Image (cartoon, rainbow, N blue to C red):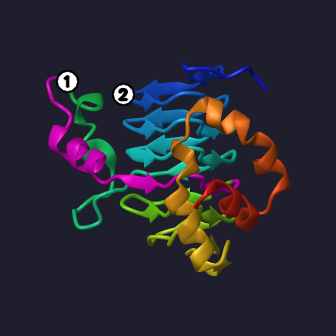
Amino acid sequence: MPKLDEEPFIHPDCEIVATEFGRYCEIGRGSRVQHSRIGDYSYCDRICDIANAEIGKFSNIASFVRIGASDHPLERASLHHFMYRSASYWEGEEDDAEWFAARRGRRARIGHDTWIGHNAQVKPEVTLGHGAVVAAGAVVTRDVAPYTIVAGVPAKPLRARLPGPLAERLMALAWWDWEHAALRAALADFRALSAEEFVEKHGG
C-alpha cells in the first residue's frame, strides 16, 4: 500500500474529472471519478465508477463499485444518448448542456465510515447514513439508515451494524472529524476496544 499524505494517491489508468479530494485519499487503478467530492481518508479499490457523488470521510469502497450511475430518459421516444451527446453524431450540433446539468444535480451521498462491497451499486439521489454497510453485489435504490447493513437487488436491510443507542453515541463522538494526530494517539484503542468500550473511554 502506498504512503498516503495530504494529496490524493491516484493509481495508474484513472480518469478524474472535476472532483475535489480531502486528505489521505486513494483511488484504485482504472477507476473513473467525475463531478464528485471525496472526503478525508476515503478510498476506492480498482475499477470503480463514481459520478455526481458526495462521499464522506473514511469511506471504504471495494473494487468494481458504481456510485451515481448515469441514467437514460425513459419518458422520451428513444433511450439513446444521441439526444444529449449530439456533437458526437452531427457536425455543428451541440451536446445537451441542460441534460448534463440535471444529471450532475442528482447527487448520491455517502456518509462517514461506510463500507460498500465489491460490485455493489448506489443509485443517484440515494443517501447512505454514517456507518452503513452495503453487501457485495447489492443495488441500493433507497436511502440507508446510519449503521445499517443492506444486501440484495434491490438492497434491503439485513440488520443493524450496531445497536441504535451506541450508533447515536458514535455519531455524537464524530471521531471522523478528529485531527490526524488525535487518530494516531487513539490507534491502540481503535484496534483493541469494542465500539462500546471506545465511546465509553473517549466520551461519546
Residue count near mark 1 (Cα–Cα under 10 Å), binned few <14, some 14–19, many ≥20: few
- Of mark 2 and mark 1, the one earlier in the sequence is 2
- In the picture of the structure, the residue carrying the numbered disc 1 is 91
In this picture, which residue range is highlighted in magenta?
91-118
- In the picture of the structure, the residue carrying the numbered disc 2 is 18
Q: Position of residue 115 (x, y in %)?
A: 64, 55
Q: Is 114 within the magenta? A: yes
Question: What kind of element bears circle 2?
Answer: loop
* Residue 189 vertical placement versus 35 (above, below): below
Q: Amino acid at mark 1?
A: Glu
Q: Residue at x 68, y 63 (%)?
A: 200
Residue 130 visible in this rendered orientation of the protein: no
Q: Position of residue 75 (x, y in %)?
A: 23, 67
Asked if disc 2 and disc 1 are in contact, CB closer than 8 Å, the reply is no
* Residue 181 vertical placement versus 190 (above, below): above
Q: Quarter of the image for the C terminus: give it.
A: bottom right
Q: Position of residue 17 (x, y in %)?
A: 41, 27
Q: CA distance from mark 2 to mark 1?
A: 26 Å
Q: Residue at x 65, y 54 (%)?
A: 202
Q: Position of residue 165 (x, y in %)?
A: 58, 77
Q: Amino acid at mark 2?
A: Ala
Q: Is 10 within the magenta? A: no
**In the drawing, does residue 18 fall left or right of residue 118?**
left
Circle number at residue 31: none
Q: Residue at x 81, y 43 (%)?
A: 188
Q: Quarter of the image for the N terminus: give it.
A: top right
Most foreground residue, 120 or 22 = 22
Q: Residue at x 39, y 58 (%)?
A: 124
**In the drawing, does residue 138 fall left or right of residue 23?**
right
Residue 55 visible in this rendered orientation of the protein: yes
